[in-house]
Image: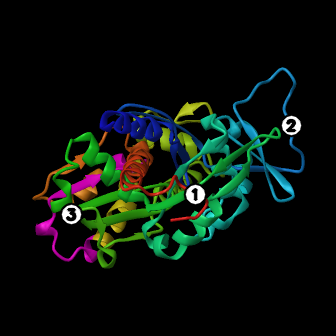
Amino acid sequence: MLAATFINFWSYLMELIVRAVDVGSGNTKFVTGVTGADIRCASFPSIAYPSSGETPHWPANERRKTVCIPVGPLFYEVGPDVGLAADTFRAKQLHDEYTESPEYTALLRGALSMMKVPHIDLLIVGLPVALFSLKKSALEKAMVGEHQVGGGKTVTVAKAMAIAQPQGALVHYAAEHKKMATIGNEQSLVIDPGSRTFDWLVTRGMRLVQKQSHSINRGMSDVLRLLAAEISKDIGSQYRDYDAIDLALRTGKAPVIFQKPYDISRHLPLAESVAQQAVSTMRQWIETPESLQNIILVGGGAFLFKRSVKAAFPKHRIHEVKEPMFANVRGFQVAGQNYASTTSATGRDRPSGDAT
């Protein structure tokens, strides 16, 4: 009898569909599937290109990896190949009310569409630290219900839970380093330089220390705009190929401008100055850095901010994770699965339409 009950419980738990989405200002990351401890992720640029019709305007012989999502009176084209269609100046939204914008809804629904499941029992989403307490309840409420994902298809979300973005990274780090059992007794700092915001989170165990955690608008987009302005002055012409600058910073490969490789290395001190400003501001919020047992650097901008972080904490080891861009969303997934298993084990109902 007991064995049968145990088997039924785990069968029920395995049937629960938990998924995670991290709609960032630079990229939208999402979980496509889970097999044991393997969490598979994908991403696309956080660009939502508006149009008045559902059919994308591209040649019949050209297939693009995008979907058209209806939001209000418009449709928004989103997906990996959206850069082929989008005027990024029109399509990007970088402001604190972003989660309430139609573009955010389109990106979220685009991710839901690409998960290939019609129903999600528990959806985990993220928020910047500075907006977490202000936006958590409203975002969770907005996520619950039926979502139109284009082509007449829908995805239904039964329950939603919002997490501070770097908290997802902490969960991922603990799971990756097999520290889930011990990190609850440790004090940690998670640093997450993203596209628009530079977030940091101080925790005791898994609990957020609100007064030492914050986010500021100092991310990779600031670096890219600053360098684009410097290149424009240098070449005497407007230059806005942010993707080429980003690739050059990450790989060292020179961008090609007017058919010639351009030496971007002369502008690196300027890029470093943005990281230094952000880390210096964060450092002022940390009350007892000597008590930190874990300092974890994640996010798409981790490579550029690493030197400044190490300079700010010279006596600490700075931990990094594999694929830092997906650290938050993988942590969201682990947190969601843990929540689902805990609520099921304590006899609570299957996730319903009420937001957490």
Q: Nearer the viewer, residue 320 or 306?
A: 320
Of badges 1 and 2, nearer the viewer stands: 1
Q: Give me the residue at 32% from left, 65% from top.
A: 201
Mark-to-mark CA distance, 1 and 2: 39 Å
Q: Is residue 32 above or below residue 108?
A: above
Q: Nearer the N terminus, badge 2 or badge 3?
A: 2
Report if residue 81 lies within the magenta region.
no
**Left or right position of 229 against 118:** left
Total tally of numbered discs in the picture:
3
Q: What amino acid type is highlighted by mark number 2?
A: His
Q: Give me the residue at 42% from left, 69% from top.
A: 215
Q: Which mark is residue 312?
A: 3
Mark-to-mark CA distance, 2 and 3: 49 Å
Residues at badges 2 and 3 in contact (C-beta under 8 Å)? no
* Rendered location of residue 312, percent (x, y): 21, 63
Q: Secondary structure under badge 1?
A: loop
Q: Which residues are magenta?
A: 283-305
Instruction: Give the residue at mark 2.
Output: 57
Q: Give me the residue at 56% from left, 42% from top.
A: 243
Of badges 2 and 3, nearer the viewer stands: 2
* Rendered location of residue 330, percent (x, y): 41, 44
